[in-house]
Image: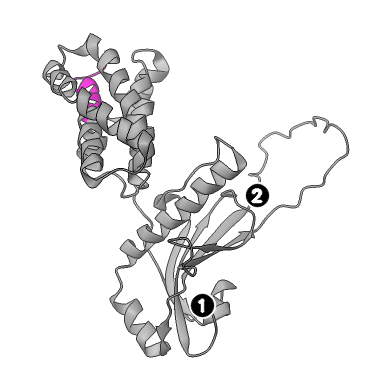
Amino acid sequence: MTSGSRRFCFVQFEFPWLIGPEPGTYSIRERLGEPPAHILVLATLGAVQRRLLAGRRRAREAPPEPPPQPVPTTRATLVDTGGLDGGDTAARWLRDADLAELAQDALARLNRVLHAHRLAVADPYAREVALEQSLITRVGYGEGERVAAGRWERAQELAPASPAGGRLPTAGRTAALRPQERLAALLSGRDVALACEELALRTRADLDAGRSREAALQLRVAFEAALAELEPWREQAGLAARLERLRKRRDAVGSVANAALRGGLEPEHVEVVTAVLGAVEAALRARTAGGLS
């Protein structure tokens, strides 16, 4: 990435925590042997210096009504190495660009990095990020190394994302669950958390992130758990018919999982994962849609 008349497009996020990888510059290649398609620049802002004490740290008296603890912010800048010819071209690009789509594409690439980081450090608690978690999202352009250093020429800030984060395709997926009512029921013991719910969420996260093999393998377990765990509610809200339709997909789910064990999945395999996961999610919604006692 060089300076000069060329302008480089970027998407920038700021998150109110340390997202994982050390600050620095990371090259992202789409395929082995190709030049980097994107450069990711991670910087830590507002970090609180902590004095390292030898030995064990002693507990200390906590004052009443303490002020909030300052937290570091991570700034993640994804720069497209393709570049545009001149400021006029870049200005037209920014004027006509679908900023929301660019932000989602950049977020997907950032999450690929965070997923790789989780594997590299073997930390099950390292997490990916969602658009609504970004304090500020900017899309813009600038000259070469200046963009990597955070000095852009022009940029626009996106409106804050909704709490749903744009990840759920329909309002029905959340509306039927009545999150606050469900949370109260879980905390009071009036409802139970099913293992298949967590497994389905993990499957959805893998599928949305493009990790189709992981999604297919996770789906097999989520599918079998759902059939077993939803059985006590089969007479509620037409759940019996949903369970019967799910059972007819058992062979297809197993076949796709076996294909995932052997290697990459074909598009028709991904279609099966998408359809069956949607059916499992619909069955879970049906269980809570009738009310919680």
Q: Quadrant of residue 118?
A: top right
Whether 286 is among the magenta residues is yes
Q: Which residue is mark 2?
A: 70
Q: Is residue 221 left or right of residue 248?
A: right
Whether 287 is among the magenta residues is yes
Q: Is residue 176 visible?
A: no
Identified by mark 1, the residue type is Trp
In the image, residue 16 lies at what x, y percent? 55, 51
- Residue depicted at x 21% and y 23%: 250
In the image, residue 180 lies at what x, y percent? 34, 29
Work out whether 108 lies above or below 250: below
Element under disc 2:
loop
Label 1 to label 2: alpha-carbon separation:
27 Å
Identified by mark 2, the residue type is Pro
Give the residues in magenta. Answer: 282-293
Residue 152 tag number: 1
Q: Main secondary structure of the magenta part?
A: helix
Question: Which marked residue is nearer to the observer: mark 1 or mark 2?
Answer: 1
